[in-house]
Amino acid sequence: MPELPEVETVKRGLEKLLVGKTIAKTWHDWPKSFPNAKSDVDEFVIGATVIAIQRRAKVLLIELSTNHTLVTHLKMTGQLVYRGTTSFGAGHPNDSLIGQLPDKSTRVIVEFSDASKLYFNDQRKFGWMKLFATLEVPEIDFMKRVGPEPLEDDFTAKQFSERFKRRANTSIKAALLDQTVVAGVGNIYADESLWGAQIDPRRKVASISKEEFTKLYEELRAVMNLAIEKGGSTDRNYVNAEGKRGSYMDFARVFRRDGLACPRCGNTISKIRHAGRGTHLCETCQT
């Protein structure tokens, strides 16, 4: 599943590509991917102009001039790929990991008045693009439950550690993956930040010292900011808004490096099953 850096990368790409465009028509082949009444689409989507692209946790918000928002969750295999009308430039398939669109994974197409298109591809069919009145978006159950954004300037190390207090008997990795604790952290950046902080992912939250929480906070923000700079992590299905891969995996220290030498101590990186996920760590220097 795309994590915060991947969704933020898509958001920044769509911001450049879609804002100011007017929607001419939509198409979908899977009702659960676009669960919206035709009458609502006709009234609030067709003819609407994209005025902003926002992100909350792993969710994208395509805000429209009709005071409605297309709330989009990519889930496990979702992709949002823009294709323009020219032979060259942003989104051209020759500069993309994705070939000609639509393809067999395309679930939704949003076509704009200039004939450019936004394709929502989703092999597993778990993702969705739902229409809400913009004022109702903060009241969506997910939005009310999700934790704070870890990269916000006013989110401090103290606030970060306090978010974990109610998960004292949970492992630190499981707590990091809990979206109600902190928003947007998934498997890749949990493993990467725990390695950076030299914390064993299996340790109970209650055993983590104040100093270790501060280090974990710093590492999480550092790896996520680096991932955004590198366009995210293409581990399996993720691509950016132009269909290109992210390069963070070229800089990963521990994730998908099992069997290789730890960059810090030289011992072999292990992969175990923990918190329901494949977990990468150095069992020598993560204690």
Image (cartoon, rainbow, N blue to C red):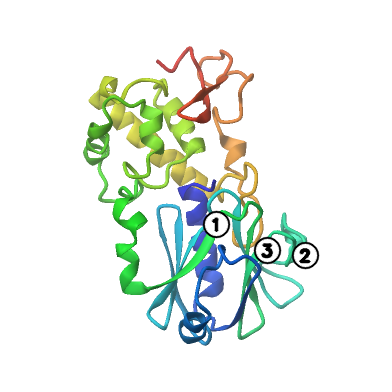
**Residue 130's spot in the image, x, y percent?**
47, 67
User: What amino acid is labelled 1 in the image?
Assistant: Gly
Labelled pair 1, 3 in contact (Cβ < 8 Å)? no
Residue 100: mark in rendering: 2
The residue pinned by badge 1 equals 127
**Element type where label 1 sits in the image:** loop
User: What amino acid is labelled 2 in the image?
Assistant: Gln
Q: Is residue 8 above or below residue 28?
A: above
How far apart marks 2 and 3 lie (CA) works out to: 11 Å
Q: Is residue 3 above or below residue 107?
A: above
N-terminal label among 2 and 3: 2
Name the side, left or right, on which 138 lies relative to 53.
left
How far apart marks 1 and 3 lie (CA) works out to: 11 Å
The residue pinned by badge 3 equals 106
**Residue 249's spot in the image, x, y percent?**
60, 38
User: What amino acid is labelled 3 in the image?
Assistant: Thr
Say which of 12 and 143 sits in front. 143
